[in-house]
Image: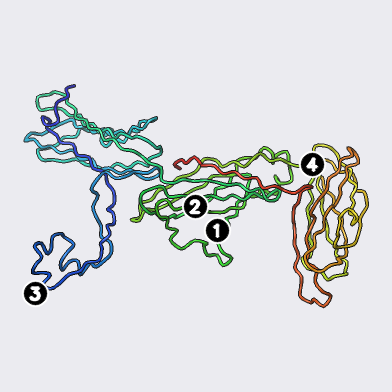
Amino acid sequence: MDTVEPDAHLLALKVMRLMRPTLVELGPVVSCEHKDLVQRFSSKPYGDVFSGSISETLSAGQVLLLPQSFGNIYLGETFSSYICVHNCSSQSVECINVKTDLQSNTTRINLSLHENSKSPITLAPGGTIDDVIRYEVKEIGTHILVCEVNYMSPAGYAQSLRKFFKFQVLKPLDVKTKFYNAEIEEIYLEAQIQNVTTSPFCLEKVELDSSEDYIVTPLNTLPNGESVFNTKNMLQPNNSCQFLYCIKPKPHIATDTHVLRQLSNVGKLDIVWRSNLGEKGRLQTSQLQRLPYECKDLRLEILNATNTVKIGTIFTFNCRVTNTSEQTMKLHVRLDTKLSPECQYTGCADFMLDKLNTGENAEFPLSVSPSKLGLIKICNLLLIDTEKNEHYTIEKVVEVFVVDADYNKDHKIFQNRLIRYENPTDLIIQSPVQLQVV
């Protein structure tokens, strides 16, 4: 096969990137009448296309400007290119085959136009074949568009024409995540998304697609259903915004601590955005992972407790203790006001629970009588495992607001509050997230 100089070829190959125009700012324009003194001394009154009478119509604002360069391409966007083969000779050219490849650092994608055509393509003098190729870029770094045209010359020689177009694919977003372990079964994820492009874009969708073992509740809307952000979710270059999600294991998993220890993948962030002229981009993060689940030997759950009580009355609330260890427990429950200095309530408890195997739970009531007004804390509940002689102290069981005896407002109820046998500590991760194309 012969390869000749481009100028000597019978065919011309044209490749152009297809992209939308950009918006150009027009500053305020001050015009004047022809008879004004300023106009008479002006050597070039209307030097550019946006001055003069046209500027008065356009005023200050933005106009569309056709692309002046190749522009930037970002990961997750669709690369579009127009390819045209024109017969610029006075003879017919036969057996034309157009092949297009997009080569990255790791892959080579075939985007051929007429390679699979069953019948040979023949171009008459002045004839043209063209097409548009589209590809969603899935890798950051250097890309090369390779366009090759093979044809048969009138003399019967096989010839080829090849052109290369090199461009860079850039990162559009910077995503950082933080995990907060609140209660035993609750995880809060904060996702920070930053615009690292050179132009503003609109976040169309930011969702956390949970894994099959977790349930996700977005916390990015107000009680009336409106978004906490403005309606456009517009991000200027280098600006960022945060999204919050509550993640819980499914009910049948939450009670199985052995399974819960193995579930670190919570889901993926699915992000869709559009440029200022509507060009769409979409990326998905890699699998987000929580810290390894560290389960304590037992946990205490407050099933129900009123948040307001009258001073001097009996305040009773129910508790549920669950054995999350790998051994059988026999618990001795003690609540003694003498263990708490400056105690703000009276009452005591001292009893034994039945044996609890791994994963089993037992419920029991506790009663106290508040002796001071204001917010008081029921604390220092002692759980003793008589099998191993281990002591577990609950430093804060529940809080209640104590009011005067004349207080008549209806009181509310707290339900399903989980606490550990020691003060819970927030587990926080802040790390960049790897992005990938869906």
Q: What element carries label 2?
A: strand
Which of disc 4 and disc 1 is earlier in sequence? 1
Res. 332 mark: none
Give the residue pinned by disc 4: 297
Discs 1, 2 touching: Cβ within 8 Å: yes
Q: Which of marks 3 and 1 is nearer the N terminus?
A: 3
Element under disc 1? loop
Give how far apart the Cα atoms at labels 4 and 2 are.
Answer: 38 Å
Q: Is residue 44 found left or right of 302 in the rendered image?
A: left
Name the mark nearer the viewer: 3 or 1: 3
- 61 or 41: which is nearer to us? 41
Residue sitting at x 24%, y 68% = 59
The residue shown at (75%, 60%) is 415
In the image, what residue type sits under mark 3? Lys
Which image quarter is the C terminus in? top left
The amino acid on which the numbered mark 2 sits, given as a three-letter code, is Val
Labels 3 and 2: the sequence-earlier one: 3
Residue 327 as seen in the image, left or right of residue 256: right
Q: Name the residue under label 3.
A: 35
Mark 4 / mark 2, whichever is N-terminal: 2
Relative height, residue 10 to residue 345 (above, below): above
Q: Nearer the viewer, residue 93 or 136?
A: 136
Mark linked to residue 220: 1
Mark 3 crowd level (few <14, some 14–19, many ≥20, 10 Å Cα): few
Asked whether the residues under the numbered discs 1 and 4 touch, taking CB atoms below 8 Å apart as contact, a structural biologist would say no
Q: Percent from the top left, x then y, of residue 75?
A: 40, 42
Circle 2 is placed at which residue position?
A: 206
CA distance for labels 3 and 4 = 93 Å
Point out the image quarter for the N terminus. Answer: top left
Inter-mark Cα distance, 3 to 1: 60 Å
